[in-house]
Amino acid sequence: MKITSIKQNMDKLLDQDFIMALFNQRLNKFYPDFKQVDGLIFHPYKRHVGKTSMIMVVEYVLNYLTIDEKIKKINLFSSAHSDGSRTRSFYGQSYLYDHGFDQGNFLVGRPLFYLDGQFAFFYEAVLGRTFRKVMQEKPDQDFSAILNLAARWIKKMHDCPVDQDSKFVFFDFSEMSPKPQKFLDDMSKVYPELGQRLDSTFHRLADLKKKNFNTFPVSIIHGDYHPENIIVKKLEPDKIKVIDFTDLSLGDPMVDLGSFIQQIDFMGFECLSRANINKYKTIFLEYYFNKKFEDIDINDLNRINLYQAWVVLRTTLLLFYAKSAIHPLGELIEEIDRYLSLAESSQRKINLY
């Protein structure tokens, strides 16, 4: 499909008449008291049109008339990508919602429906603040309560049963975008010395994964578990919600643990002390495994460090393509190598500093 046709179809997500008719037709399935839309406000959060693809995120603040003539307010979102990838989010979030994450302390937002023509997943807004925002606003507070819930949320997901007919794909970091050969070539063209270092580091990581860490208990994994995807309403919450299931798949549960603690490290450097970053990474793992750090299986720690290296690689590429100087790229490549050294030598460490 040409980008002009894609644009015409996806821009309907900002068409008042189209969305009003859509909601009037569909929302009674999810809200039994729904009669009709009474008022609608749009908040476009993202609208990116590329040469061959398009991405949109839109919030809808909606008043609806109930069957007993009252007015209720709800906040809905649509997330759309012309590559069809939001079907994966819709399926994954719906699966979790139907398998125990619709109530209790560990939650996901309520999924609604997927609209094929607009490549869009519609869902209820998750209200609150991201854990990252809380860290930035109150860096001197103790975040143990949030970390406890975050660890238990992901443990619950890892223990979630997988139906035989499920549509989950398997996680494979060699399928990353952009492909390894492209980002290695791109880096070498701009920074020849760094490109050579990254090439060596990437192949070291891939070889280590293939030779030493290819056996693991398969579970559902989030694939991008970090503080920006955790929503809370207070510092001492009794429940949390998790968002963004674009990368939900089957794989090694240590992917999510390595991702989370490394992103605590990366996102925390701007607001937390190094001592607290190291402490929070450790206690998160202790909450997850329900044991002291020194008693955690060294094979699990080795895989966690492998995936910490993997997350630093992704961060390196993100900053490279964004042309950001927030971290020197050479120092990030060095961090990848140091995490790989921890994994190779079975050191009982998860912190580099």
Image: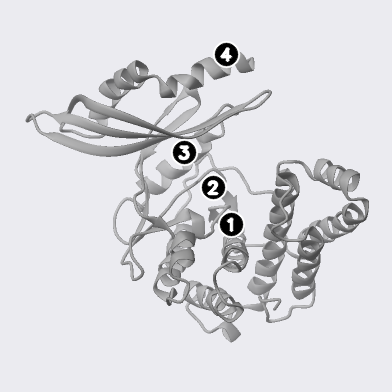
Which residue matches tag 2? 248
Which residue matches tag 1? 218
| Mark 2 or 4, nearer chain start | 4
Disc 1 versus disc 4: distance between alpha carbons?
40 Å
Amino acid type at mark 1: Val
Question: Residue 124, which numbered label?
Answer: none
Height in image: 326 above or below 117? below
Q: Is residue 122 visible?
A: yes
Height in image: 25 above or below 56? above
User: Residue sitting at 81 percent across and 67 percent down?
Assistant: 334
Determine the image quadrant of residue 257. bottom right
Protein image colouring: one colour
Badge 4 vs badge 3, beta-carbon distance below 8 Å: no
Amino acid type at mark 4: Ser
Question: SS class of the residue under badge 2?
Answer: loop
| Mark 1 or 4, nearer chain start | 4
Which residue matches tag 4? 5
Which numbered disc, 4 or 3, marks the residue closer to the eye? 4
| Mark 3 or 1, nearer chain start | 3
Question: SS class of the residue under badge 1?
Answer: loop
Disc 3 versus disc 2: distance between alpha carbons?
9 Å
Q: Can residue 117 be seen in this view?
A: no
Question: SS class of the residue under badge 3?
Answer: helix
Height in image: 274 above or below 303? below
Badge 1 vs badge 4, beta-carbon distance below 8 Å: no
Quarter the N terminus occupies:
top right
x, y percent for residue 92: 47, 43
Which residue matches tag 3? 91
User: Residue sitting at 30 percent across and 18 percent down?
Assistant: 21
x, y percent for residue 54: 59, 27
| Mark 3 or 2, nearer chain start | 3
The answer to which of 170 and 334 lies nearer the viewer is 334
